[in-house]
Image (tube, rainbow, N blue to C red):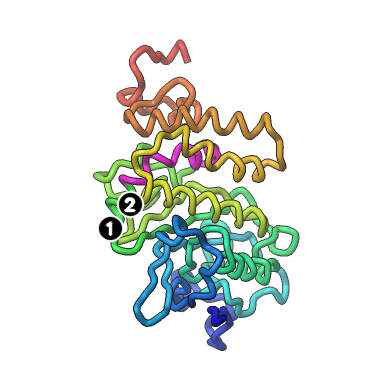
């Protein structure tokens, strides 16, 4: 059965490091799949793909990663099917920017995305191309036919796990603005989650250190979008149950660490729902006590 194939383009500008924001435009790899790519999907999963009369299939959800590194391994910079290009970055050194990737349920099409990640391991894995604490791992999400404003409003309810996972980045100057994911903001680009037209960019995630880590982040983002778009009235506890296996895998099957993250995610969910900082989130969101006007009643500087 006919299926989509992902290959390199031969574009010289995709296999060299260029200046900041000078890399070639990304290709949209979520377009033009075939029936064979979704043959194993269940009917409920097919709601997240768009089957066209022509026989082609498009992904309803898309994702893009920025992989920031202190340096690239010697000889590693070449064209990969995964990456649109490579740039210098003033905050950390260098970054690799993926094409626009289909964000998919488990199946043959998703496997092709993961295969592209493995093929680019010399860029992604820290054992080849090291990162450091200056580096981040921004993730861009989009839904076909949905504005960035609506997407942010829908994602807010299911972002508590993202906050708990990357809580140490909440006081990073490159991503600490607008911790409540409010649509109306002061216009700073250094937000936890930034609206960019019909997309949103989560600037909160930490550096990418490995292929398997990148895969787990992909899986988490798919589940977030699936709930935000298709199950917006689901409880946060139902969502947490769905992502628990992903978080458990992120922490090497450490049950105690997984529970710690998921418990903290409940506190972040409450903060995002109410717009008020609570005792559990205070050390991460406002350690310098600059946002006392957004604290829960009962919190005090001395008491915390």
Residue 174 at x, y percent in the picture = 45, 48
Residue placed at 46% from the left, 51% from the top? 203
Residue placed at 72% from the left, 73% from the top? 74
The foreground one among 167 and 251 is 251
The foreground one among 161 and 175 is 161
Distance from disc 2 to disc 1, alpha carbons, whole Å, reads: 6 Å
The residue beneath circle 1 is 147
User: Compared to 158, does 84 lie above or below?
Assistant: below
The foreground one among 228 and 87 is 228
The answer to whether residue 159 is left or right of residue 125 is left
Pointer 2 with pointer 1, Cβ within 8 A? yes
The answer to whether residue 142 is left or right of residue 264 is left
Q: Which residues are magenta?
A: 153-169
Residue placed at 48% from the left, 49% from the top? 223
The residue beneath circle 2 is 151
> Residue 51's quadrant in the figure?
bottom left
- Secondary structure of the residue carrying tag 1 is loop
- Secondary structure of the residue carrying tag 2 is helix
Dominant secondary structure of the magenta stretch?
Answer: helix
């Amino acid at each position: 059965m006919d299926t989509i194939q992902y290959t390199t383009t031969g574009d010289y500008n995709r296999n060299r490091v260029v200046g900041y924001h000078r890399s070639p435009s990304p290709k949209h790899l979520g377009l033009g799949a075939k029936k064979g790519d979704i043959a194993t999907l269940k009917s409920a999963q097919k709601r997240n793909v768009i089957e066209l009369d022509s026989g082609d299939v498009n992904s309803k959800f898309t994702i893009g990663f920025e992989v920031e590194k202190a340096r690239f391994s010697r000889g590693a910079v070449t064209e990969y099917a995964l990456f649109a290009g490579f740039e210098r970055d003033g905050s950390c050194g260098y970054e690799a920017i993926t094409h626009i990737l289909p964000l998919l349920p488990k199946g043959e099409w998703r496997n092709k995305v993961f295969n592209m990640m493995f093929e680019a391991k010399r860029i992604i894995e820290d054992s080849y191309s090291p990162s450091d604490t200056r580096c981040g791992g921004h993730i861009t999400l989009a839904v076909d036919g949905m504005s960035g404003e609506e997407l942010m409003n829908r994602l807010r309810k299911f972002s508590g796990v993202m906050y708990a996972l990357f809580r140490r980045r909440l006081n990073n100057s490159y991503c600490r603005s607008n911790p409540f994911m409010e649509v109306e903001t002061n216009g700073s680009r250094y937000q936890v989650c930034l609206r960019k037209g019909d997309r949103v960019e989560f600037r909160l995630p930490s550096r990418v250190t490995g292929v398997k880590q990148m895969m787990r982040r992909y899986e988490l983002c798919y589940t977030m979008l699936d709930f935000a778009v298709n199950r917006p009235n689901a409880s946060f506890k139902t969502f947490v149950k769905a992502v628990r296996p992903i978080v458990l895998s992120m922490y090497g099957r450490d049950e105690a660490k997984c529970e710690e993250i998921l418990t903290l995610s409940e506190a972040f969910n409450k903060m995002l729902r109410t717009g008020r900082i609570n005792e559990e989130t205070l050390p991460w969101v406002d350690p310098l006590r600059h946002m006392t006007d957004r604290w829960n009643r009962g919190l005090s500087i001395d008491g915390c």
